Image (cartoon, rainbow, N blue to C red):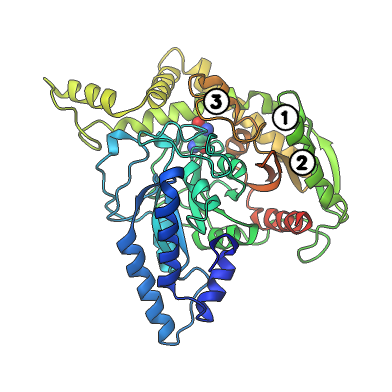
Amino acid sequence: MKLDELTIIKAHEGLKTKHFSATELTQAYLARIKKEDDKIHAYLTVTVETALARAKEIDEKIADGLEIGILEGVPGSIKDLILVEGVKCTAGSKILANYIAPYDATVIRKLKKAGVVILGKANCDEFAMGSSTENSAFGITRNPYDLERVPGGSSGGSAASVAADEALWSLGTDTGGSIRQPASLCGVVGLKPTYGAVSRYGAMAMGSSLDQIGPLAKNVEDCKIVFDAIKGKDARDATSVNNPTPPPLNLRGGAGGVKNLKIGAPKEYFAKGLDKGVEKLIREAIAKLVAQGARVEEISLPHSAYALACYYIIMASEVSANLARFDGIKYGVAAGEAQNLLEVYLKSRQQGLGNEVRRRIMLGTSSLSSGYYDAYYLRAQKVRTKIAEDFKKAFKQVDLIMTPVSPTTAFKLGEKIDDPVTMYLSDVYTVPVNLAGVPALSMPCGKIDKLPVGLQIIGPHFSEELIFSAAQAIESALK
Ligand code: GLN
């Protein structure tokens, strides 16, 4: 079997028709990981035994003549921020170097029920803070398209594992772009679902009002299959909901058609700072829909200009609260020598947490402290409302919004790591989406000098179906 040609659908067909067994499929992926991952380092942990044991169970089911579901026996990877029972879960942090997950995240429980084979845990920026995976305490991940370049982040291991054929699908998390930006830089499809569409139970929290778990895969259809398997209300996450049945949207061309679809191209996302080559490919992708009868118009999301500033206050504030539990007592490796409890906390955090994480905890603690709260946190929340209103208004005018995912293709390893503000700028186009809570997908739309470029398709709350249809139309037109 040729792994580079496989998709979830094809793997499923292969298993069903007994072209190959789930064990053979899993072994093929494990062999690929063994061969490639020294170079790429997409994985932090490879769960060989449990993967093969699961594959064997599926093979027995097939041998018994039972029907198998679409994901049964299909191997994938999981960002190391999401708990898989009995498996180490580090969040890319030294402070959790020995932490073994005591239970399954809801998404994992659902995927296990769907019969997937989990190959292992994917590298990520420490506690999902970063855009290049260089903030992992356990080493960098390389972009499979160019080993001297970053895979994006924070779900860089997830994106690289799919791009390097070391997994057929992956789960990532996205707080400000961490699924879409690595998907874009690694040439795969990634979805940041509507806030609340997928349960966050069992995903380590970064910014709880922004975080969502979502799928990465090789094409739009595969991405949808994984999304369908993980979505829905969960009693353990009060913010999760069942996706309301068909969103009040007008894919007026009929089933799957994009005729008469109205697309908005926000002028703020095609302005200074955007690489010309990237812009050209994005506009060409949109033109593919126009050729099928869609209309495109320039729109404005005027408050997007404040999104990064607003995000770095709100996210950091939530980070400062969420990460308080990693103190060497409740969670985390405790510092060796300490005179009293406070010293245990201080030393454990100092030794266990990396620079970027500490920077954000300090920033967040400061914006929440008395005297600063009104000037920073409260102000940022007001700006957030403005940003959300921009989207609401835009979606009265258009069905979907299309933008670049990232202003450039994958940058060089080390290029931005010493300049946090430049690094933060790689998320200008993705962060507003999390602040508004709407869904967005990143899909490949061409390459510049062999490096993939991603198109971002943003829709109103719970419009994932519409996003997938438009993405599929573009995907087939680009073939
Ligand atoms: N890169 C952004 C950050 O560093 C987004 C991270 C994320 O989505 N988890 O905060």
Q: Earlier in the sequence, mark 2 or mark 3?
A: 2
Q: Amino acid at mark 1?
A: Asp
Report the disc number at residue 281. 2
The location of residue 133, given as percent across then percent down, is 47, 35
Residue contact at pointers 2 and 1, CB within 8 angstroms: no
Residue 59 vertical position relative to residue 306 in the rendered view, above or below: below
Frontmost of labels 2 and 3 is: 2
Secondary element at image label 1 = loop
Asked if the residue at label 3 sits under 8 Å from ligand 1, the reply is yes
Q: Earlier in the sequence, mark 1 or mark 3?
A: 1
Q: Residues within 10 Å of mark 3 (few under 14, many from 20)?
A: some
Please indicate whether residue 74 sits to the left or right of residue 297 in the image.
Answer: left
Q: Amino acid at mark 3?
A: Met
Q: Quadrant of residue 108?
A: bottom left
Q: Disc 3 designates what residue?
A: 423
Q: What residue appears at the point 51 percent right and 33 percent down from the top-left corner?
A: 132
The location of residue 376, given as percent across then percent down, is 51, 18
Regarding residue 107, the answer to whether it shows in the image is: yes
Q: CA distance from mark 2 to mark 1?
A: 10 Å
Closer to the camera, 302 or 102? 102
Q: Disc 1 designates what residue?
A: 275
Q: Quadrant of the C terminus?
A: bottom right
Q: CA distance from mark 2 to mark 3?
A: 23 Å
Frontmost of labels 1 and 3 is: 1
Secondary element at image label 2 = helix
What is the total number of numbered labels drawn onto the structure image? 3
Please indicate whether residue 11 sits to the left or right of residue 463 in the image.
Answer: left
Q: Earlier in the sequence, mark 2 or mark 1?
A: 1
Q: Amino acid at mark 2?
A: Leu
Q: What residue appears at the point 25 percent right and 30 percent down from the top-left corner?
A: 327
Report the disc number at residue 394. none
